[in-house]
Image: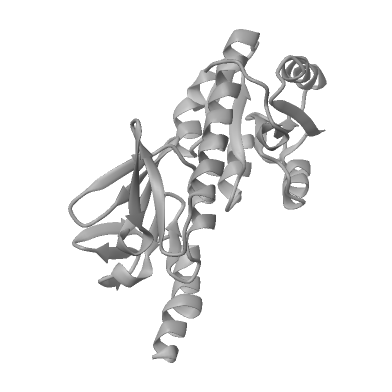
Amino acid sequence: MTSQVQTKSSILQCLIVDDESFAIEGIIVHIKKLNFLEVAATCSSAIEAREILRKGNIDLMFLDINMPDLSGLELLESLDKPPLTILTTAYSEYALDGFRLNVVDYLLKPIGFQRFFQAAEKALEVHNASVSLKDEVQPSEMYIRQGDAFVKISWADILYVESMQNYLKLHFDGKTYTIHQTMASLEELLPKDAFFRIHKSYLVNIAHIDLISGGRIFVKGKELPLSKHRREELFNNVILKKLISK
C-alpha cells in the first residue's frame, strides 16, 4: 500500500482489551506511530469491553484471548456484530478458533512493530472496502470489486452469503463472487426485511428459502445450518409476518 495522507473517515477508532497493563501500553506505542489508527478506549476485561462496544464508535478491537471470567474468544462468540478484530496472545494454539470467528489477524506476543503494521494495514483495507461498497449501494443493486473491475449485481438475485475468514462468498444461481468484506458491514447494506442471519457464518435471502427442516435450511438444493437461537426469531419475526401480509 502506498503511503498517503489519511482522511478523518479513514482513521480507525481502536479498543484495546488486555488484562496486562504493559501489553496495553505496548499496543498504544505502536498505534501512535500510525496516522490511520487512534486509541478510543482501553480496558482489562471482556466484560468491560462489551459495555464499551454497546456504545458504538469502535472500528477495530485489539483483543487478548486469555483473560479472567470471559475469554476473548468467548467475547467474540457472544457478539452479533463485532468490530474488526485483531487477536493478541502469547499462545499459537488458538489461531484456528480466531479465524473461525473471522478475525482480521492473529498477533503473537511479544508483538513487533513490523508485524503489527501488517495487521493494521489489513484492517484498514477491510474497513475501506466496507466504506467503498456502502457508497456504491443503490436501491436494488450494488457494485462489487472483482480484481481490477467492478461488477454490478442485484441483491434480489443473491441466494445466500457465506463467511470465509476475512472474505465473503456471494452465492447466486450458477455462480459465486468472493469479496473482501465483513458479514456485519454487508448485512447493514442489504434490505433487513429481505435477508436474515441464520447462522454466524450464513446470511440468507428469505425469498429463496425452499424448505426449513429442524436445524437446516434449504436454498436451491443447498443445505445450510440454522442456529437454535435464531430459529424462533426467523419464524416469529420474519416468516410469520410475510404470511400475514399475504
Say whether residue 43 is visible.
Answer: no
Residue 209 is drawn in which quadrant?
bottom left
Q: Position of residue 134 (x, y in %)?
A: 53, 49
Residue at (69% x, 25% y) in the render: 36
Numbered label tally? 0
Residue 2 is drawn in which quadrant?
top right
Residue 199 is drawn in which quadrant?
bottom left
Q: In the rendered view, does 188 fall on the left or right side of 24? A: left
Q: Position of residue 40 (x, y in %)?
A: 79, 35
Instruction: In this rendered view, identify the residue nearer to me: 153 or 173.
Output: 153
Say whether residue 20 is visible.
Answer: yes
Above or below: residue 22 compared with residue 69: above
Q: Position of residue 18 (x, y in %)?
A: 73, 28
Q: In the rendered view, does 109 fall on the left or right side of 25? A: left
User: Where does the C terminus fall, quadrant-wise?
Assistant: bottom left
Above or below: residue 165 compared with residue 141: above
